[in-house]
Image (cartoon, rainbow, N blue to C red):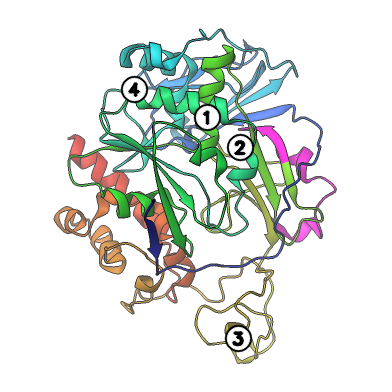
Amino acid sequence: MVKVIRIKRGLDIKLKGGAKDVFAKANPADLFAVKPTDFQGITPKVVVKEGENVKAGTVLFYDKKNPAIQVVSPVSGTVLAVNRGEKRKVLDIRIQSDGQFTSEPFEKAQPSDLSAEQIKERFTAGGFWSFIRQRPYDVVANPYDTPKAIFISGFDSAPLAPDYDFILVGKNEDFQLGINALAKLTAGKIHIGINTEYASKVFKETKGVVIHEFRGKHPVGNVGVQIHHIAPVNKGEVVWTVNPQDVVTIGHAFRKGILDFSRSVVLCGCCVKNPAYYKTVYGASVSTIVDGNIINAGQARYISGNPLTGTQIAADGFLGAYDAQITVIPEGNTQEFLGWIMPRLKKFSVNHSYFSWLTPNKEYCLDTNLNGGERAFIMSGEYDKVFPMDILPEFLVKAILSKDITRMEQLGIYEVAPEDFALCEFVCTSKIETQRIVREGLDFLKKEMEC
């Protein structure tokens, strides 16, 4: 019998605009953008030029420090532009799709028949390393490392998050092949975290993995929280993490010999008229999905990802490389009469400031208003209530701000990623951008450790 791991600390933010388990149709996107900034830890060296024809799987850029890490085109078509910013920093590579989705060749094989080196060679050829991230540092994994384990979170507990059990229906074979390939790359085990409230049929039927059942509030679905409660990362250790849909992409390539980077995304949020799931490809323009389906479109915030950790994009922006969610919520650019003095019967409150605590299952339409500005960072203990790790989050953030490497290590920085601090940022009365601080701290520590 699988032991249930119960997470007591956290916070479920119930928002309006959740999607039912149904797919809707939209016109295929014809414009795509691949952004190097999506792939943390990579210093890009672009190898394509404007006007060049590419296929799905054609290398767009690779990591200057580790050329085996290649980021490839998600579609076939023509490179429209290589956009650069200050100091010639690569902002994105724009691709005009030809609608054919022609793939670079990929040799079909049974992963169980291949050696670890052969699997690595195929991962490099398919651009799959960019799908795999590692702890510590929450960056793209180093192909030359041997992780002590690989972790996959089989569910997402963030507000309005997609349901992977629904998305992966009928993809058991590809998921299993992807698992078989990944299993060759670790001396340890592959761990999959599932939610006890869902069927998780695809995951429960997967062979060669260790299943862990979790129950609790968000961020119980964060892979970092699951790693912490299963096999914490110590200094000198490396673990890898992979998204379930990317496992399917890997398995599909081994089964069909085709590089298919399509994925299912959920369009959700209280500004969406008809929330639903859509088939698309990473890097795709979201305009074909959102056009005509948004309430008060001129006053809406478009987010690639979930409301806590996602990235703001334009209405004709592009889906992030790791995102399976497009969230549209109201902008918070209005001022409220009498401010905090108002009873705010329709406002969500973490504490008992408003009467929302009397209706814990009520759904809210929250906007992006900060309700105040940044102020002195006060150690109040409020982070601890929503941070389900045996780590002192406020002290860790302070250590990062002071660049105290010894304290950062003692306080568990090797275990965390910015997303683990999203709720801390949400409840912070000082309005501190904790996710940004943690990202900067991880980048600083990685640079120092490589010197």
Seen from the viewer's position, the closer of residues 392 and 22 is: 22
**198 part of magenta stretch:** no
- Which amino acid type is shown beneath numbered disc 4? Lys
Q: Is residue 350 left or right of residue 162?
A: left
Q: Position of residue 27 (x, y in %)?
A: 81, 32
Q: Which labelled disc corresponds to residue 183?
A: none
- Which amino acid type is shown beneath numbered disc 3? Leu
Q: Position of residue 328 (x, y in %)?
A: 69, 55
User: Mark 3 or mark 4, which is nearer to you?
Assistant: 4
The residue stretch that appears in magenta: 278-301
User: Mark 3 or mark 2, which is nearer to you?
Assistant: 2
Q: How many marks?
A: 4
Classify 10 Å Cα crowding around label 1: few (below 14), some (14-19), many (20 and above).
Answer: many
Q: Is residue 235 left or right of residue 258?
A: left
Secondary structure under tag 3 reads helix
Judging by the rendered image, the residue that carries numbered circle 3 is: 358
Secondary structure under tag 4 reads loop
Secondary structure under tag 2 reads loop
Residue at 72%, 58% (x, y): give it. 300
Judging by the rendered image, the residue that carries numbered circle 1 is: 175
- Which amino acid type is shown beneath numbered disc 2? Leu
Q: Are marks 1 and 4 in contact (CB under 8 Å)?
A: no
Q: Are marks 2 and 1 in contact (CB under 8 Å)?
A: yes
Q: Are marks 4 and 2 in contact (CB under 8 Å)?
A: no
Of the image marks 1 and 4, the number of the one nearer the N terminus: 1
In the picture, which quadrant includes the C terminus? top left
Seen from the viewer's position, the closer of residues 85 and 246 is: 246
